[in-house]
Amino acid sequence: EPEVTQTPSHQVTQMGQEVILRCVPISNHLYFYWYRQILGQKVEFLVSFYNNEISEKSEIFDDQFSVERPDGSNFTLKIRSTKLEDSAMYFCASSEASRLARGEQYFGPGTRLTVT
Amino acid sequence: AQSVTQPDIHITVSEGASLELRCNYSYGATPYLFWYVQSPGQGLQLLLKYFSGDTLVQGIKGFEAEFKRSQSSFNLRKPSVHWSDAAEYFCAVGQNTGTASKLTFGTGTRLQVTL
């Protein structure tokens, strides 16, 4: 069964450093998402992406964050200057369709980001 | 704004016992509702979903959930729990937004199964 993959599984970085989290969505999917879960808190929507553009972003997704589909398979989340409060599990997801009734979101296993 | 509440942070049941995980949502229109499960080291796997129609929906691994509009609930049930069901369970409400969609999750319920 096709699946969403994410690398690395765990990333440790120092405050102020840039990090790039990588995701390979399911191959025929066109809609891509990032969510995050701070330890002990809810999974929160960050951003959705379609046709090389951001479709929607949450208030969490400020200028420190960016997303990119650099080639035909990868989807990345970049944090330019990490803060301690960026420590979280980051989930990538993809879907075949924009409407939930026509395509559910499939999630990857997550990347645990630890900022020290 | 939509929101999801899972009142139980941690539940322990014996193998073979029945299970019910609670989920309450807040959403203005007819909601898209989901239950996801996360096993250690794994991604969020969809168990079942409700969009419309029959309010009792069947999912994978023997799970079912019932949508009750009057109670704004979408509780997950399983008649007989197996040790392999030990995991974290997330309820979510979905919203179509422009050219995409987004999910709002609850805080999750961690299920422990005793033998």
Image (tube, coloured by chain):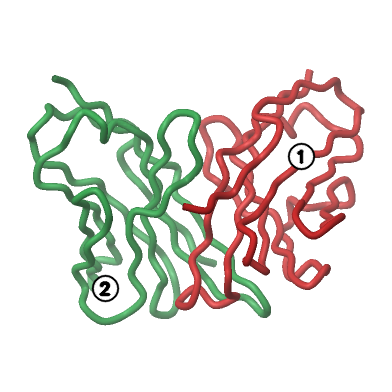
Chain colours: A red, B green
**Residue B9 x %, y %:** 35, 34
- Quick one: SS at disc 1? strand
Which residue is depicted at the point 48% across and 77% down?
A102
Between A87 and A108, the one nearer to me in the picture: A108
Image position of B79 with respect to A104: above or below: above
Q: Are marks 2 and 1 on the same chain?
A: no
- Residue A116: name its quadrant: top right
Q: Which residue is mark 2?
A: B69
Residue at far front of view = A1
Q: Is residue B68 left or right of residue A61?
A: left
Answer yes or no: do the residues labelled 2 and 1 have beta carbons within 8 Å? no
Residue name at image x 70 percent, y 29 percent: A113
Q: Nearer the viewer, mark 2 or mark 1?
A: 1
Q: What number is the disc on residue A21?
A: 1
Front one among A75 and A12: A75
Helix, strand or loop status at disc 2: helix
Residue A17 in the image: above or below residue B57:
above
Q: Residue at x 24, y 48 (%)?
A: B61
In this view, the residue in front, A25 or A42, is A25
Horizontally, residue A19 falls left or right of residue B39, namely right
Give neighbour class at mark 2: few <14, some 14-19, many 20+ (Cα, 10 Å).
Answer: few
| Location of residue A61 in the rendering, given as x and y in whole percent from the top left corner | 77, 53
- Image coordinates of residue B21 in percent, x first then y, are 25, 46
Amino acid type, mark 2:
Arg
The image shows a total of numbered marks equal to 2
